[in-house]
Image (cartoon, rainbow, N blue to C red):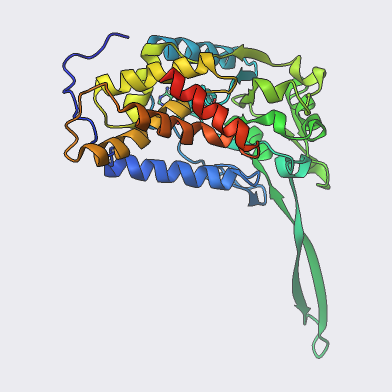
Amino acid sequence: MADDSSRKRKVRGRKIRSDRSRKESRHAKKKLARKSSNGTSSASARSGDGPLSAPEAVAPDPFVETDAVASLRSRITGWLEAEKPVHLIGPTGCGKTALALSAAAERGRPVVWINGDESVDTAALVGANAGGERYKETDQFVGGVSKKTEVVRERWVDNPLSVAVREGATLVYNEFSRSDPSAHNVLLSVFEEGVLERPGKRGEDRTIDVHPEFRAIFTSNDVEYAGVHRQQDALLDRFVGVHIDYYDEETEREIVKSHVDLSDEDVAAIVAKTRALRDELDLVVGTRAAITAAKGLAVFDGQRNGDGDGDPGEFDDELLTDVFMDVLAPKIAGEGPEDVSQLRTQIAESV
Ligand SMILES: Nc1ncnc2c1ncn2[C@@H]1O[C@H](COP(=O)(O)OP(=O)(O)OP(=O)(O)O)[C@@H](O)[C@H]1O
């Protein structure tokens, strides 16, 4: 995408954008992520089988759409239209989640979100009995005779998958390969027979017929995907897989610009540095690292230059090294001091 030359160049060292509506929307997304971290969803777990009060489809905000982004997204929405579950595979921080949420939002159906992790089991996906409800009935039909009965009724709580298949939502299952593969056995009949079985649920409504509008997007990290939790071939066979890599340089610049209020030159310098480190280091240096570095530089460079009048696109070498070191250091947390100083040397040399 060509640079927007009408964009007013912004002075380096300004504050990170803090527009109120954007903040509120980010706050809503954070809430969504917090809920999802225990296997619940944006649609939230609920009891009974009543209608879902569907949440608005949450489009990521900010969301940059260059040709590269739009083309990937239409590949995803195309496969969803063809009724195929889509599996997005790519390195950490390359934009899988943002893309999945954007594609899901585009469908205009409710979005149900799950985060995969070790604790996700079948019940976390499907639902479970959440204890009994006790109440007393008093029968006084016969004069002078009073009969009291205690009734215990099981209370079932649906979890995200049940909600999504019933309501025809778009399920976004983030980092699904982090969950135990056995938790996903229930997905086979969802995609094959169009029926969800709810183990633990008794009676006629033990199964749910899958809504014709139900669709699913799965994401996984390409490194982890090949690791411990190799998912069943029978399941993977029913997905289409879309491999994503880091975006082109222009797209990465636009993405960083959308998150941080810095001049085009500054953003270009940060993205170029990120891409160089990506090539040179043995670490995964994603777009998220570029955004974090830009946020740090917006603050620290402003502090250093006081009124923020440093030359656009030129940061102090030591500052740049410090900031990238802090951004990438978590990736070598737990390594010895030698590795830490080696990383610093590599970054400084690259700078
Ligand atoms: N098209 C986009 N527009 C705006 N921001 C984006 C876009 N794509 C990615 N980002 C931003 O880049 C960062 C990384 O993206 P995202 O979280 O989607 O990556 P991911 O591949 O899902 O990462 P992980 O594997 O760690 O979950 C996030 O801050 C996200 O907001």
User: On the picture, is 323 further left or further right than 237?
Assistant: left
In the rendered view, tell whether residue 214 sits above or below residue 306.
above
Closest to the observer, 216 or 149 = 216
Residue 26 at what x, y percent from top left? 40, 41
Quadrant in which the C terminus appears: top left
The image position of residue 285, as x and y in percent, is: 52, 23
Q: Quadrant of the N terminus?
A: top left
Write the residue at 52% across / 26% down.
Answer: 93
| Left or right relative to 234: residue 78 | left
Name the residue at the bottom extreme.
Answer: 144
Q: Residue at x 26, y 42 (%)?
A: 303
As rendered, which of 75 and 66 lies closer to the eye?
Answer: 66
Front one among 272 and 163: 272
| Residue 40 locus on image (x, y percent) | 63, 45
Q: Is residue 248 above or below residue 335?
A: above
Q: Is residue 245 left or right of residue 23?
A: right
Q: What is the number of callouts on the image? A: 0
Residue appearing at x 33%, y 19% in the figure: 269
Q: Is residue 157 above or below residue 292?
A: below
Q: Quadrant of residue 221?
A: top right
Residue 5 relative to residue 160: left or right: left
- Is residue 36 visible in the rendered image? The answer is yes
Residue 154 in percent (x, y) is at 78, 59
Res. 60 in view: no
Choose between 265 and 202: the one closer to the eye: 265
Picture quadrant of residue 215: top right
